[in-house]
Amino acid sequence: MATKFIPRDISWLSFNGRVLQEAADPDVPLPLRIKFLGIFSNNLDEFFRVRVAALKRASELNIKVANSYFYESPSIILDKITELVIKQQRKFDKIWHQVQKEMAKQKVFIKSAEDLTPNQLKFVKEYFEEEVESSIIPLLLDESKPLPYLRDKSLYLGVAMYKQEWQYETKFAIIELPSSHLGRFLILPSPKQQKHIILLEDVIKVNLPYIFSYFGFDQFNANTFKVTKDAEFDIDNDVNTSLVEKISKGIKNRRKGKPTRFVFDQDMDQKLLEFLIRKLSLSKRDSIIPGQKIHNFKHFMDFPNVFGSYEKLVERTSFEHPDFAGMERITDVILKKDVLLSFPYHEFRPMIDLLREAAMDPDVKTIKITIYRMASNSKIANALVNAARNGKEVTVMLELRARFDEEQNLDWKERFEMEGVKVLVGIPNKKVHAKLCIIKKRVNNKTIQYGFVSTGNINEKTAKLYGDYCLMTSNKSVMADINKVFTALQRPKAVLTDTIKNNKSLMVCPIDMRSQLNGLIDKEIAEAQAGRKAHIIIKINSLSDKECIKKLYEAATAGVQIDLIVRGIYCATNQKKFIEPIRAISIVDEYLEHARVFYFYHAGKEFTYLSSADLMTRNLDHRIEAAVKVNSRKLKQELKDMLDIQLKDNVKARILNNKQNNEYVQNDEPEFRSQIEIYKYLAPKKIVEEKEIEEE
């Protein structure tokens, strides 16, 4: 009998394997292949900081409830993770080797400290003296003293030093790379038609004799390593401590996190390696992973633009939504009809303009918005500040616990409050992940309300890279439900179910989304059992909630057609008892598939929802999330068409099967790449026709 559930963390590694497939694909432009290697590395870092850390804590507790939570014994999962990560690392190294060959064909070379020409050597030494020297602190290591504190996200150079004719013991030192403010890459003076690049660690290697000149060493063996630490922190329940203080304390406590992974250059001096492992108190059960020369590959997401420009597909550009073409005010359109923005195909600008218009409109009285992650130089934030300056009552629900953005959001809180913006910081033990906005204006003694519900962050930077939806609307029922959510957020001590109830257009976590989804699935089950058409399509980032999976199993057993598009974690399996096997695919392409859509045939009524929530226990039970029902027939059809387009993908879609082996969807149909086809579907006919003329 097939396993009922795939452990979440094993499934996640399968997802990261799909990212690695993109880096290996020779049809992907070279700069993007390098970027995918960086994304893979960055993903893995976060995985070890959070998920592996949680597994290690659970394995130490050795309790049955942990086995149920993780779907298998944490210690068994940890062993599987180590095995899979080492396999993926070997694949990563092979891909990077091939990528470097492709780089060489384009005359782009990464030079080591030993490969520099005299002119380049002079350039590197001058750069070190002017930019690097003041930013590094070499730390000598001593067996009798504790290891200096090692930062979680930093890369280190481990240095073994000795003098050739001496018989004395080798000295060890470490140097933290100041890549956060200097960057990792330095473009060197290069021969004509070539681009030579040196990494920051090699800049430092060149200058080791100068750095340690006091000791008179003439032999240096320097290699990079990094430590990944437990990033989770517990927020205590001290009622005398404000949430802001708790978050600040939690960020500081990350310094104390236990190591969850140690990655090092396999050529590192053996005695130095043993010294570091001993001082970090690592054991065989810890993830000690040998690798190639280069680590912290996340920096390669920002690799210098040194390649001959590759032709960017027209289908990779954003365009104005046709409903806003020629219109002076976004607000006028929204008050007349619902508009669906599909990012990154549509421009993000209407969301900014809606808030800018509200900031200047003398009739607008209040603006309320939830914010999870913002761009560093956010135009959304500027519009909200301008609204406050213009006398509007602006309320921002700012999630201070957005993982790894806590510090930035604390800064935004301070800036907002200085400008007179009221900042809400959420409900105890519940992250606010819903993406909601409501604007109220008074015209002729009448209140007019409008706003939006989004599947993704209100962030103009990620809107260029993430596939998301935003429903802009003035629907009274939607606005009434959004008002309930904000009332609850403004009364954090009140009982949620007393404030958020009887919703007509929103499903809200943790109030009623789970029960409403179950009810919608039950309707499809009843239709299938009656011999009528029953169909469910769900597009999400992750499916790991055990109860949701069991409900889908029940539907599949009844014969409901189930189509799933799941980018990341997928814990379900197909069972022999299913009358209709679950069809599940994952699409990994240039854009990050981030939208969540729930579609139910519902006896021909076709209920469709856009959601901020994935089908994960954390979303359904421990966060404030919102899914909005799409009422417009036109927009429902548009969403259904785009779901159908993705289900037809046979270029970037992988089959999510019981083996989790990431097989590509293959059929006899012509190549069909959904992200390109969605662009063609959404683009105004004029753009498509111009492209066709160019091709002819």
Image: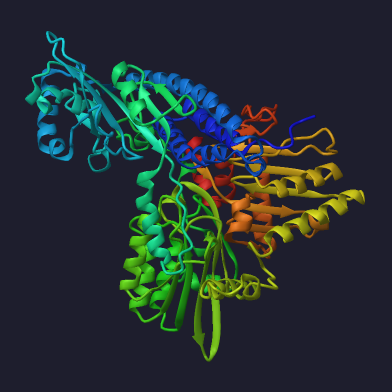
Please name the residue shown 76% across and 30% down the image: 2
- Residues 348 and 430: in front is 430
**Residue occupying the far top of the picture:** 165
Say which quadrant the N terminus sits in.
top right
Position of 94 with respect to 62 (left or right) is left
Give how far across and how far down residue 172 sits, in percent: 22, 24
**Residue occupying the far front of the picture:** 144
Please name the residue shown 78% across and 43% down the image: 553
Observer able to see residue 107? no
Label total for image: 0
In this rendering, is residue 463 above or below 155?
below
Give how far across and how far down residue 319 sits, in percent: 47, 53
Position of 194 with respect to 13 (left or right) is left
In terms of image quadrants, where is residue 226?
A: top left
In this rendering, is residue 451 above or below 513?
below
Please name the residue shown 46% across and 79% down the image: 366
Observer able to see residue 167? yes
Please name the residue shown 29% across and 39% down the image: 149
Give how far across and how far down residue 530 sits, in percent: 92, 51
- Residues 42 and 279: in front is 279
